[in-house]
């Protein structure tokens, strides 16, 4: 680790040691002014400073449907919360008798309260970055991308780096990767880096390429282990870099300050609680971000539960300054806790970086990009085992998934304690039929994202060929008993809206209901199973199912309150009518929709 970076992390930890702020500070208050004005700040409990009158610790929830959680989804008339945990549930009369005075009452006014929704795979700081950067999602061609970047450049001094995210060439005519020339012509004075929607490819303009020393002819594609640099017919970089090759440009972008990182975290947290999420699994944190989140938690400024998975690179660094609680421990209850590490086995399907057993159907000869050798993966898993960190390995292609399963099998045979870590495969997007049963046999949790299936369905068959599609987006095949479903969104790759994920799991269709039977009709889920994937299944995947995921007595009182019931409404209502009314974390309101909405 560099001396400068080490000093920054120590600075964050020193601030943590001095933290005395109360829990419940508003995330919106530190967002940039324009965004803060455009959003309604969440309700927050009153500040309880020294000598302040004690606030009631009891909360009685009544007046609506209260669903207690998977697998039975029983309902209760009332729920009593004390000290941030569920104390009892039952009839309203019984709960009023049970409640200790003084207590507050939350009248649901006919709404539906669910166990707090959890996203099992997202990128917290990445969401905050996207909310500040140029948003390129959904644009229909590269011309629209260039126009949007030029608009941003018009208000910035020459030489300022411009970053954006969200372009997807699969939405454009011809579905071809762009080249930098139109972007360079429109924005010549600013270095520009625009990440693809999946974060596994980027396009840089001429100014950025020049700063990286990539602006001249090259004798051939420069070898980048685990990456690709796309070249034109005359041997010049097109500006498109895939997976590990992206670092050739991104390492020249000035590092964000701690203040900027904190601002992005708070901005993302606000977006998440407004979406009804009470918890997330944050994938790929560097040590500086982990230290920052620990400090913010100590200061009481995190409005939701954050389960941290360290970045792969962090495993080679000094972890002595980072709290690594025992996996699944019930002895401590921070809102931020590190439980695992995120490793990368391959790239993404959309940028043809996913590692496949046979070549891409639409690019013969290309097998994708394995990012780790079996030996490297074995070493990383041994390190996770040593630290008691749960491994969560990104694997999208069928070759990548097979290699991870092989490695998990080897590690389980060598270590009797490894299986207790609940090893995960993130995405498990394309799996060979020969490997379907190995997830269950090895106790591996497939952590999957239903909206990936519906986003990818227009082009995935052309990538994979019809013969491989049955092994793609196959949560039923990888988890036949549906006992360990762990669902997320991979935000900001997809929307962080969990209702969109539940809808996709139920229908396997787009927002218009197409195709009517679903892209993968045999993988469609009942609403109860889909909702379980965003509650108890997600909690189980982090080893925290004794604390979160249901509204059983003793669990933390995390609730998502909606104006529709996902278990009984028509699926389309989740997208059109469904709104988050309130988000409660440990019995405190993190977000409440205003009457104006």
Image (tube, helix red, strand yellow):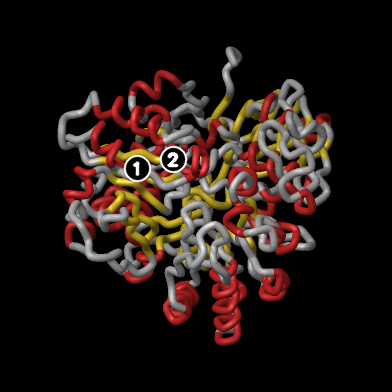
Q: Is residue 527 left or right of residue 432?
A: right
Percent position of residue 201, x then y: 40, 52
Residue at left 58%, top 52%? 120
Dot 2: few (<14), some (14–19), or many (≥20) neighbours within 10 Å?
A: many
Q: Specify whether residue 205 is in view.
A: yes
Residue at left 30%, top 43%? 180
Q: Residue 466 is drawn in which quadrant?
A: bottom right
Q: Name the residue under label 2.
A: 167
Percent position of residue 465, x then y: 64, 59
Vertical position of residue 573 compared to residue 452: above or below = above
Residue at left 56%, top 45%? 279
Percent position of residue 500, x then y: 64, 37
Residue at left 50%, top 34%? 138
Dot 1: few (<14), some (14–19), or many (≥20) neighbours within 10 Å?
A: many
Q: Mark 1 points at which residue?
A: 194
What secondary structure is marked by label 1? Answer: strand
Query: Which comes sooner in the sequence, label 1 or label 2?
Result: 2
- Tell me how many marks there are: 2
């Amino acid at each position: 680790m560099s001396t400068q970076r080490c000093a920054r992390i120590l600075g964050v930890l020193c601030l943590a040691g001095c933290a005395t702020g109360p829990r419940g500070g508003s995330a919106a208050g530190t967002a940039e002014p324009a965004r803060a004005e455009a959003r309604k700040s969440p309700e927050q409990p009153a500040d309880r400073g020294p000598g302040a009158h004690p606030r009631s610790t009891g909360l009685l929830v009544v007046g609506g449907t209260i669903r207690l959680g998977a697998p039975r989804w029983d309902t209760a008339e009332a729920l009593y919360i004390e000290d941030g945990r569920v104390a009892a549930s039952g009839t309203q009369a019984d709960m009023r008798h049970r409640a200790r005075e003084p207590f507050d009452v939350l009248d649901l006014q006919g709404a539906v309260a669910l166990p707090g929704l959890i996203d099992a795979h997202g990128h917290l700081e990445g969401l905050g970055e996207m909310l500040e950067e140029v948003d390129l999602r959904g644009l229909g061609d590269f011309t629209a991308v260039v126009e949007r970047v030029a608009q941003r450049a018009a208000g910035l001094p020459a030489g300022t780096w411009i970053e954006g995210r969200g372009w997807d060439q699969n939405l454009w005519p011809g579905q071809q990767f762009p080249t930098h020339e139109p972007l360079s012509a429109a924005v010549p004075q600013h270095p520009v880096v625009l990440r693809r929607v999946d974060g596994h490819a980027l396009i840089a303009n001429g100014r950025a390429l020049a700063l990286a020393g990539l602006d001249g002819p090259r004798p051939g594609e420069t070898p980048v282990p685990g990456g690709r640099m796309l070249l034109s017919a005359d041997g010049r970089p097109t500006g498109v870099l895939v997976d590990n090759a992206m670092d050739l440009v991104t390492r020249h972008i000035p590092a964000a300050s701690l203040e900027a990182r904190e601002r992005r975290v708070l901005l993302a947290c606000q977006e998440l609680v407004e979406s009804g999420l009470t918890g997330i699994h944050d994938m790929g944190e560097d040590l500086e971000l982990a230290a920052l989140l620990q400090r913010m938690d100590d200061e009481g400024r995190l409005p939701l539960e954050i389960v941290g998975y360290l970045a792969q690179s962090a495993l080679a660094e000094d972890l002595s300054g980072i709290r690594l609680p025992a996996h699944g421990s019930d002895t401590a209850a921070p809102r931020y806790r590190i439980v695992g590490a995120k490793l990368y086995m391959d790239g993404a399907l959309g940028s043809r970086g996913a590692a496949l057993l046979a070549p891409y159907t639409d690019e013969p000869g290309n097998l994708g990009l394995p990012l780790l050798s079996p030996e490297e993966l074995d070493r990383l898993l041994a390190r996770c085992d040593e630290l008691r960190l749960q491994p969560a390995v990104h694997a999208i292609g069928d070759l990548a998934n097979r290699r991870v399963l092989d490695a998990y099998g080897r590690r389980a045979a060598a270590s009797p304690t490894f299986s207790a870590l609940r090893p995960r495969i993130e995405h498990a997007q394309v799996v060979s039929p020969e490997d379907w049963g190995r997830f269950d046999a090895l106790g591996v949790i497939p952590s999957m994202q239903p909206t990936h299936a519906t986003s990818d369905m227009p082009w995935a068959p052309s990538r994979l060929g019809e013969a491989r599609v049955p092994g793609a987006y196959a949560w039923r095949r990888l988890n036949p008993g549906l006992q360990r479903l762990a669902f997320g969104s991979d935000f900001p790759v997809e929307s962080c809206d969990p209702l969109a994920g539940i809808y996709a799991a139920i229908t396997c269709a787009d927002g218009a209901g197409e195709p009517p039977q679903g892209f993968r009709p045999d993988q469609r889920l009942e609403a109860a199973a889909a909702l379980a994937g965003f509650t108890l299944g997600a909690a189980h995947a982090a080893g925290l199912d004794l604390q979160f995921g249901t509204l059983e007595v003793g669990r933390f009182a995390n609730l998502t309150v909606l104006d529709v019931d996902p278990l009984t409404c028509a699926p389309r209502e989740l997208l059109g009518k469904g709104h988050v009314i309130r988000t409660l974390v440990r019995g405190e309101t993190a977000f409440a929709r205003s009457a104006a909405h």
